[in-house]
Image (cartoon, rainbow, N blue to C red):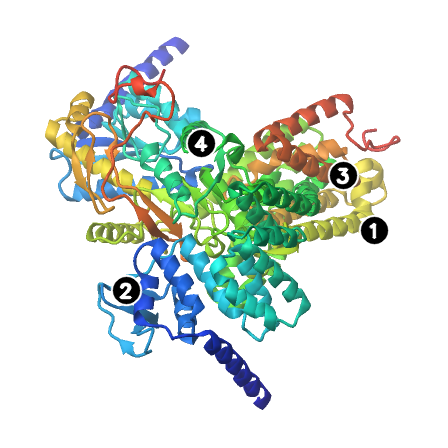
Amino acid sequence: MQRRFTLKALTAAVALASLSAAPAFAADDTIKVGILHSLSGTMAISETALKDMALMTIEEINAQGGVLGKKLEPVIVDPASNWPLFAEKTKQLLGQDKVAVIFGCWTSVSRKSVLPVVEEMNGLLFYPVQYEGEELSKNVFYTGAAPNQQAIPAVEYLMSKAGGGAKRFVLLGTDYVYPRTTNKILRAFLKSKGVKDADIDEKYTPFGHSDYQTIVADIKKFSQGGKTAVISTINGDSNVPFYKELGNAGLKAKDVPVVAFSVGEEELRGVDTKPLVGHLAAWNYFMSIKNPTNAAFIKQWSEYAKAKKLPGQMDKPLTNDPMEATYIGMHMWKQAVEKAKSTDTDKVIAAMAGQTFKAPDGFTIEMDPKNHHLHKPVFIGEIKADGQFGVVWKTPAPIKAQPWSPYIEGNDKKPDYPAGKSSS
Amino acid sequence: MLRRSIQAARMAAVLAAVLLSGAAHALTSAEATAMATGDTDDRVAAINQAVLSADAKTMAFFQALAGDTVKTTASHVYLMKDDKGYDPVTGAELKVPADAEDVVNNNLLRSTLDTAMAALQLASPDDKVRADAVQVLLNEPDESRLPLVEKALAAEQVPAIKARLERVRAASMLDSADRAHRLEAAATLADSSSPEVKLLLNERLAKEEDAGVKAALLAAVHSIDGRLVWGDRINAIFSGISLGSVLLLAALGLAITYGLMGVINMAHGELMMIGAYATYVVQGLFQRYLPEAWFGGYLVAAIPVAFLASALVGAVIERGVIRFLYGRPLETLLATWGISLMLQQLVRTVFGAQNVGVENPSWMSGGFTMLGNVALPWNRICIIIFAALVLAAMAWLIGRTRLGLFVRGVTQNRPIASCMGVNTARVDTYAFALGSGIAGLAGCALSQIGNVGPDLGQGYIVDSFMVVVLGGVGQLAGTVYAAMGLGILNKFLEGWTGAVLAKIAVLVFIIVFIQKRPQGIFAVKGRSAEA
């Protein structure tokens, strides 16, 4: 009796399942796009806006008729700032939801977690954030900056007369792969410029660290030995207590400038920026850049944020570099799909080479024909009292990315194109 | 009224006299253009040049440049005021073309402008203004300003300011080509106890080639170091006490719910989070409904609100769940853990997953400079005082009041307390609500130094349990010693090994300590609680 019931139930279940699977076939007139950003946890401060930017871009593309005559359908997952969960969610996106492309990740540790899955399942990932380089995967397009498009120019600026002529450097970061690698590159770079080891102080804090008293006191002490600059690779919401402590401890930008690689308009939202005026950030885009494309981009975002009632954004819409990179990445992917006339991963990868897009940073940005990175302009901005950045230095034209930094030994032998699996 | 206007007139006269005596000519438009446009280096040179022959208009122009209210076109410089442009030289109103660009200053220019303005303020009749100006000049000495400094030195009457002006003069001579001047400068500066002066000496030391001067500079640096070392010690101790006070606040509520009542309350961190969000809500109400001037008071209003909000949630949890689980620690642990997840999700749904911004009221921003190298932030000082007050209030409540007596009675021996006519069920609720309310207060305090987000509590729950267990369960005094001890230990280790290793070392220390002494620092003596 029992067994017969089980059998019946099974058949019913199978029948039901095939029924419910039917609409999935019917929905073939859409292309699924995976969005893999932390919407909770320590990285939510930075990544939530990227999810919304991706959705806005999808809406824009759909309003213009979609891609290959099909509408884009976003599939949003929340990996919750939990690195192993990034890999699991990627597996789900590629295996279960069968998305054509994934836009996602912020921290390098999350990208490293996703990488083997994307390569194994031959997926496509667009990574929108500046990072440490040392990676070149066939399945990833890096629309953020490589070290030579952000970190190195920023340090060069700090060493120049206009930047204060810093002689000593504090390399301060969150303890994971991106800050460690970036600081390794920067240390080698500083040495090549004649800075001694005694004049470099490297410090790390755990993720979510909130008590920066000792570190700020140490920076103060270190700065008595010569003109000092701090290079911050602190990621996530730890930046808020760090900058609060800086302001309260009276460490002024003109005495000890702090240049940050992960702090943009969005991270400064919750911070009183008046004591922070003059501290710096290096990016490939600032909201304050004046040109018609950027004005339209900001207007589009503001209207989207108001229409969708995005918390925070609807009262004070802000755009930043990784949001711009998400926007560029999605448009380039669309162009590549249209060129390839297919969403097949390999065909799209081939079609991505050399794509161009008129970006809000004021330049027509090009995807390198070989190395999966964008050619980007570099801007260095100082924090202003209103939480925006005033550009004090910029490159005249976009520069080519060097994912394999020449300042790390052995990199000169690595090819400037994806060769084999990179997750080794 | 009359007196004030006379004073003002006198001030203006002094200013004018001092400025005129040194001024060869007034601000010209060529000068204004040179200061506002071109390369950083050229602009710095132009500003330093203009200081030497400055007048009131130059000062106004400096202020406008520093305040980012200057616009330029290819041919003109505009002083902006209320969206209207004025000529910096004649003061006439000008029409600003649409393509006029804001003048952007970088750090170098800003500090040049600050020193330039300070140099002009040396002539101010106000002692305070002069003292501040001297301080600014000491940070950025430049040989070109030496005549201005010397003139001010001759006119200065206040001995304290005069002494510092001497230092500015010495600092300005550090880069002098004359060896005797440099030696004299090093000797004068050796008396200082400010880190800025040490920086100047070190910078010179890196460039200095003359052995005699080098020795003098080194001696000066050492003598300053001797005075700075105390500041460093005070800094380390203060940050330890500050971290200790945060730990204490976080653990005090738990000392009641876990320490006295024995409830393993995994939702303790979430009760703190509720306190922090209550603070955020009060801040929002103040921003929306009350005049701007009252905003600084929001934090005071938030204290009782945070307490009540968390206490209420605590009471509901006790009445609804924990009540049925007394004496079953494992079930309590699981149930409260579940509650903590629910509370987090609730807050995520209501306020969003992202952190919310809680601003420091202006009276809590900035710091208080004790010594040259010791600046104690107001928000930390306030939290230390707040923690002490909460501790005192709780000690009084538990030790001196009838409710406290009941709580102690019920936790020590429930049946006997019940026989004496104590309504034990109600006392449980009150005690749990009190512990939760104190967690709310902790959340209110934490909102001033850290991030306020749905997982705020997660970061503190482990620390809170550590403090309570280390101090000895059931012991208020033990909690205080444990919190302060852990705070200071953590900060000393951090200065020595870095933040990541310090955290690990503290955990290892606690594991070893609990192995050796499971009852904590203070053990409950006699036949009481666990009997």
**Which residue has dot 1 on it?**
B400
Residues marked 4 and 2, same chain: no
User: Which amino acid type is shown beneath numbered disc 3?
Assistant: Tyr
Residues marked 3 and 1, same chain: yes
Residues marked 2 and 3, same chain: yes
- Label 2's element? strand
User: Which badge, 2 or 3, is on the more N-terminal residue?
Assistant: 2
Q: Chain of mark 2?
A: B
How far, Cα to Cα, is label 4 from label 3?
36 Å
How far, Cα to Cα, is label 1 from label 2?
71 Å
Question: Residue at coordinates 30% horizontally, 79% vertically from top-left?
Answer: B92
Q: Nearer the viewer, residue B525 or B531?
A: B525
How far, Cα to Cα, is label 4 from label 2?
40 Å
How far, Cα to Cα, is label 3 from label 1?
21 Å
- Label 4's element? helix
Residues marked 4 and 1, same chain: no
User: Which amino acid type is shown beneath numbered disc 1?
Assistant: Arg
Question: Which callout, 1 or 2, points to the residue nearer the camera?
Answer: 2
- Label 1's element? helix
Residue B481's tag is 3
Residues marked 1 and 2, same chain: yes
**Residue A155 percent location from the top left of the image:** 40, 39
**4 and 2 marks in contact (CB < 8 Å):** no
Counting other residues with Cα less than 10 Å from the Cα at mark 3, is it few (<14), some (14-19), or many (20 or more)?
some
Counting other residues with Cα less than 10 Å from the Cα at mark 2, is it few (<14), some (14-19), or many (20 or more)?
some
**Which residue has dot 2 on it?**
B72
User: Which amino acid type is shown beneath numbered disc 2?
Assistant: Thr
Q: Chain of mark 3?
A: B
Question: Which callout, 2 or 3, points to the residue nearer the camera?
Answer: 2
Which of the 4 image quarters holds residue B52?
A: bottom left
**Residue B242 percent location from the top left of the image:** 66, 45
